[in-house]
């Protein structure tokens, strides 16, 4: 045999020539992502990594997330991230573009992600469900039996499903629900607003503060019923664990960004001086620029208007 044509890359391979175009890396697959898609990818990866022990690796044109078997994978595209999630039931939602049954127990749900704000419930809930049921599905037992006229185990499965849903709800609920009346958000806005270039946007349903291109602080008003009125900020390596250990009533590990070293700060537990220091440090870690503490004061020197001439130095 003189040679062959690779059915993946269509390249001609001479006889005896080594060729493995199917081998790639995560960095190679995400190298050309736009800024919005890169932020969405980073949040997606951090969220999945927080579920527990797993392998994350690149294969072909996709990045795989697997326990014993793959429970979802991502195909980075030019305009979106194609997320393929393996579940044992059909999910009908606007985020799901298509559902294909690939075995007796698995259905793959195709989702397109274009922005980091889309990496949110219910998408993250489906990812966690896929993580939790992956071993069961790999053994060929679906959580929902397809095309069955009679199913004597349906009540048992329904009870198990209810118990699973209840556990998830309790995990999300956390402490007793409480809401900010605007007081704590006003404190965060005042300090962030005194940092030059700060832009406030709504992200994940909450006020979020940008540099303007990168996030350095997020307000959480009982986010998904977690019981915290807090601000989430990045911290230096190792600081998250130290803060939580030192003052567990004040600091906590927030969802999504906690795996990246961010810390949640219970706003009712810190004064303005502490809060200002934490937010300024978060800005410095994000941008590399230091903000002096006098910028966080409650008053800002008035700028001279265009019609006012300043006296010349003599």
Image (cartoon, helix red, strand yellow):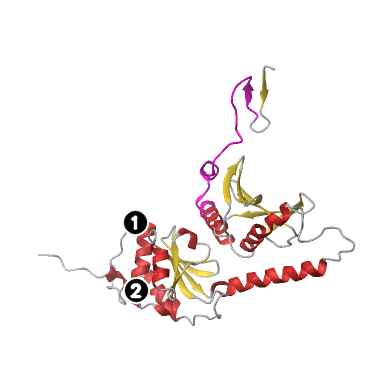
Checking the image for residue 54, the label placed there is none
Residue at the image point whose x is 44% and y is 78% from the top: 184
Q: Quadrant of residue 224?
A: bottom right
The percent position of residue 146, horizontal first and vertical second, equals 82, 58
33 inside magenta stretch: yes
Q: Is residue 83 left or right of residue 32?
A: right
The percent position of residue 187, horizontal first and vertical second, equals 40, 77
At label 2, counting other C-alpha atoms closer than 10 Å, the crowd grade (few under 14, some 14-19, many 20 or more) is few
- Residue at numbered disc 2: 274
Q: Residue furthest top?
A: 2
Indicate the secondary structure of the residue bearing disc 1.
Answer: loop
Relative to 68, does residue 300 appear above or below in the rendering?
Answer: below
Relative to 135, does residue 188 appear above or below in the rendering?
Answer: below
Residue at the image point whose x is 61% and y is 41% from the top: 61
- Can see residue 66? yes
At label 1, counting other C-alpha atoms closer than 10 Å, the crowd grade (few under 14, some 14-19, many 20 or more) is few
The percent position of residue 73, horizontal first and vertical second, equals 63, 50
Checking the image for residue 288, the label placed there is 1
The stretch in magenta equals 10-39
The percent position of residue 142, horizontal first and vertical second, equals 77, 58
Q: Quadrant of residue 163?
A: bottom right
């Amino acid at each position: 045999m003189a040679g062959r044509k690779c059915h993946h890359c269509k390249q001609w391979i001479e006889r005896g020539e080594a060729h493995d175009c199917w081998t790639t890396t995560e960095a190679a697959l995400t190298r050309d992502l736009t800024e919005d898609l890169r932020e969405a990818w980073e949040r997606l990866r951090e969220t999945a990594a927080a579920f527990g022990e797993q392998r994350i690796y690149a294969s072909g044109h996709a990045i795989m997330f697997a326990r014993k078997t793959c429970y979802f994978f991502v195909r980075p595209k030019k305009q979106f991230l194609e997320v393929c999630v393996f579940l044992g039931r059909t999910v009908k939602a606007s985020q799901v573009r298509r559902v294909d049954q690939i075995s007796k127990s698995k259905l793959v749900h195709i989702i397109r992600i274009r922005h980091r704000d889309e990496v949110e419930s219910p998408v993250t809930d489906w990812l966690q469900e896929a993580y939790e049921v992956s071993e069961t599905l790999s053994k060929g037992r679906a959580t929902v039996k397809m095309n069955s006229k009679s199913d004597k185990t349906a009540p048992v499965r329904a009870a198990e499903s209810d118990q699973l849903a209840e556990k998830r709800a309790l995990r999300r609920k956390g402490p007793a629900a409480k809401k900010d009346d605007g007081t704590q958000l006003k404190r965060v806005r005042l300090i962030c607003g005194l940092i030059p270039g700060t832009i406030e946007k709504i992200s994940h349903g909450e006020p979020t503060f940008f540099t303007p291109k990168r996030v350095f602080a997020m307000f959480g008003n009982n986010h998904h019923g977690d019981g915290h009125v807090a601000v989430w900020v990045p911290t230096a390596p190792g600081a998250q664990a130290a803060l939580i250990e030192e003052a567990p009533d004040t600091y906590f590990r927030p969802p999504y960004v906690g795996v990246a070293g961010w810390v949640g700060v219970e706003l009712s537990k810190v004064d303005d001086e502490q809060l200002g220091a934490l937010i300024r440090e978060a800005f410095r870690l994000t941008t590399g620029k230091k903000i002096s503490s006098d910028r966080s004061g409650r008053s800002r020197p008035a700028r001279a208007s265009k019609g006012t001439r300043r006296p010349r130095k003599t």
